[in-house]
Image: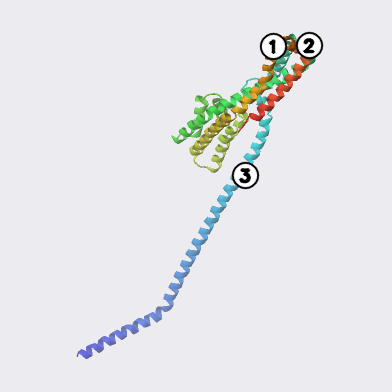
Amino acid sequence: MFGFSGSAVAFALLAAIAAAALVYVILYDRIAEDKARDRRLHSVKQSATTVSRKKADRDRVAEVQRRRKTLQDNLNDMESRQKQREKSQKSPPLRMFLAQAGLNITVRQFYIYSVIAAVTFTVIAIFLGVPMLLAPGIFLAGAFGLPRWFVGYMRSRRIKAFLNEFPNALDVIVRSVRSGLPLNDGLRLIASEAREPVRAEFRRIVESQQMGLSIPEATAKMPDSMPCPEANFFAIVIQIQSQAGGNLSEALSNLSRVLRDRKKMKAKVNALSMEAKASAAIIGALPFIVTLLVYLSSPQYILVLFTSQTGHLLLGISAVLMTIGILIMRKMINFTM
């Protein structure tokens, strides 16, 4: 009986295997088709993913190249405008020259004051006994030399005052931006609370915004009224940040630090050049010291220069040559950054 039951189990097992083989043979094509379909679907999905990834990569590269080209074009445009501005800063029109000096006068008033100064100096020189031969030169110096020198002096003084206060104004803008205020509020704060001439320059920016200009366009006009590299740096930082984005507070903080470092470097250069300035001052004062000593020892010998026509002519020539020499020495010891 045990052998019969073992044969029955073996027969049933063989029957099950045969049935499974038959079912597999029957369903083999369908299983193969399902597997092929799954492979095709996987291949299509993978291909679509690859294509979308490549497209996204191409779009990303194209966007980066587009932004890079836009930024490069903007930088080239700013560079060309900067070159043009530097040319105009070296020899600005008289109207802009007066505005840079902070003088609220018109060109016509400047010419009127120049003529008055020329007539006044000429009359004083004639009254002091200067020969009439030198009167035209004195008139021209009083009309064209002295007024423009005064305007240039006021311009340099105004730029120096601006550079002393400008880093502090940038620090105020940085703190206002970091506290969550927009840049416009920071500019208005400087325009109302800062010292002159920084307040006047930022007031022009705020007024330009009220006229419809954007902040980069308004700040780009600052170097026209304040011809110094620091104002140009500020305008470039604002323009680049508006085009490329980024952390404005960090950029302005770096600019403030750079301006303070430039100021320290200028002070160091001035300290190192004091010896040359002292030598130039001594050389420039020597003729006057020698004249005074000769007058104290032999007054009749030196008074010929002040009592004769030839002496007056020699004094005039000496004054011109001394002026040229002083200007040359000043140019040699004036280290600009």
- Residue 140 is drawn in which quadrant? top right
- What kind of residue is marked 3? Asp
Q: Residue at x 45, y 74 (%)?
A: 33
Left of 135 or right of it: where is 53?
left
Residue 194: x, y in percent?
51, 25
In the image, residue 50 above or below residue 18: above
Left of 39 or right of it: where is 335?
right
Badge 1 element:
helix
Residue under pointer 1: 297
Colouring convention used in this rendered image of the protein: rainbow
- Residue 259 is drawn in which quadrant? top right
Quadrant that contains the C terminus:
top right
Closer to the camera, 38 or 146?
Answer: 146
- What kind of residue is marked 2? Ser
Residue under pointer 2: 308
Q: Earlier in the sequence, mark 3 or mark 1?
A: 3
- What kind of residue is marked 1? Ser
Left of 131 or right of it: where is 266?
left
Q: Residue at x 50, y 29 (%)?
A: 168
Residue under pointer 3: 73
Quadrant that contains the N terminus:
bottom left
Residue 218 visible somewhere in the drawing: no
Closer to the camera, 239 or 337?
Answer: 337
Residue 286 visible somewhere in the drawing: yes
Residue 276: x, y in percent?
62, 28
